[in-house]
Amino acid sequence: MIPIQVNRLQSLLLLFILAPFIVGISGCETNPATGENEFLLLSTEEQRQLGAEADAQIVAEFGEYNDDAIQSWVERIGKEVQAQSNDTRFTYTFRVLDTEVINAFALPGGYIYVTRGLLAYLQNDAQLAMVLGHEVGHVAANHSAKQYTSSILANVGLAIGGALFEDVRPFLGAAQTGLQLLFLSYSRDNESQSDTLGVKYATLAGYEAAEGAEFFVTLQRLQEQSGTAIPTWTSTHPDPADREENITQKAAEWKAAVGGGLTGVNPEVYLPRINNMVFGQNPRHGFVQNSTFYHPDLQFQFSVPSGWQVGNFATQVQMVSPQEDAVIVFTTASESSATAAADAFRNQQGIQTLERMTVTVGGFPAIRLRTTVTSDDGGTLSVLSYFIEKSPNVYIFHGYTDIGRFNTYANTFEATERSFETLTNASILAVQPYQLDIFQASQTTTFSSLVTPNSGAGMDILSLAILNQKDVSQQVPQGTYLKQVD
Ligand SMILES: [Zn+2]
């Protein structure tokens, strides 16, 4: 039996959960950012279609941050810098994703994403303009289309991952798994080119692009603080210090070229916009504590296997075994009954039903299903599923592993999936997320004496200093806008 690793399992999951993309070969096109002709597997129209389909998945997985003022402000700055890119092929879309992960990325077809986690670490509009300009650069220079071209040859199952660019992988939350594992990175050359393009677009849109370098200092400080994530970063990304230097130099050149008059540097414009923004993981959307997954908004809980990694996404929870050879996916069904959801699953091509039982889980009517799933490449997975009706939703567990390992994991799948029950703990039901608190320094004094650490949110003085792009012992003038976490 061939050992099945998580990437292969994930690929198989994608076949069921996500619609596969079918693309054809295209020819040469002119690159809008460089003006050069190049060979691309994806035509402009195919990039547009791929982007639109993957965008729907991204929004489903992460959710958009629910604040119209923040969304429209990011869109406004995004459109301003995009207008300088000469890329008229696509109608660009800018979204703020509801995740604490510090990240920005782009899809073919002009889909640009920043996370609320990233917005928290910026200080002004110019830094945001630079981040958005960098992502526009990836699209305009066809980086994502080229990345897709090479990845499709390697593994069709990784189509979605290959289409994405991920900028700040080391700062993923420790528990992030699943789709995030599939995000591939671009080359250092592509990163440098996007930095240069981002500086150009932001400057031409009137922003002080040199501010973008400050954000790379922040990334560097986060990297030093996080420690273990460094190898991933350095193997695939240019050093933040090099990027900072490159951006500073290019920004000076462009500033001279346009004759100055650049704006967007004032924290007092930017920071009030993110006052009260959710900071860190939002526990209302589910969290793990003492080997139990709790979902306060939907009022359920279930146990998580000891030592397994948990990834919590907007539409699913993924649990991955320590050996990465088994996965339990928890999600909601689009069908309105457990029976209909179970039938929809087992009627898919390649799925063979071994057992089907009507059962009760946590007091709710449920269907227990044992199936095997055969993939196009002839591999076979063994699956234990539960479909549970808890009004108004039908919840699904799929425990997957290679058919030869099912006996190893059968008890774990069973115990996890059968542990689903109503959440009744009043304090967990009432839990609220941490929020950014923007305030002004009451007097001129050191940074450390102006902010209050929050150990529950994991924000000590150094973390707050990084969040504010300040040094712990720095003198801060009265009236300065500062961030802390309440
Ligand atoms: Zn980039």
Image (cartoon, helix red, strand yellow):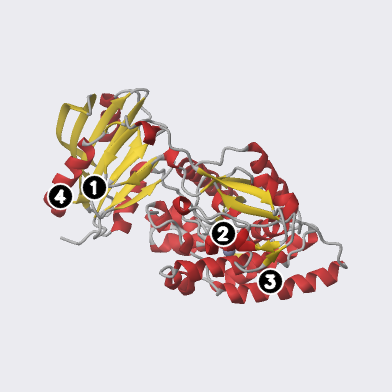
Q: CA distance from mark 4 to mark 3?
A: 52 Å
The disc labelled 3 sits on which kind of residue?
Ile
Q: CA distance from mark 4 to mark 1?
A: 8 Å
Q: Earlier in the sequence, mark 2 or mark 4?
A: 4
The disc labelled 1 sits on which kind of residue?
Tyr
Which corner quadrant holds the N terminus? Answer: bottom left
Circle 2 residue = 464
Q: Nearer the viewer, residue 313 or 338?
A: 313
Q: Earlier in the sequence, mark 3 or mark 2?
A: 3
**Ligand 1 near label 1 (Cβ, under 8 Å)?**
no
* Secondary structure under the numbered disc 3 in the rendered image: helix
Circle 3 residue = 247
Whether residue 292 appears in this view of the structure is yes
Circle 4 residue = 406
The disc labelled 2 sits on which kind of residue?
Leu
Circle 1 residue = 400
Q: CA distance from mark 3 to mark 2?
A: 25 Å
Q: Is residue 362 above or below residue 197?
A: above
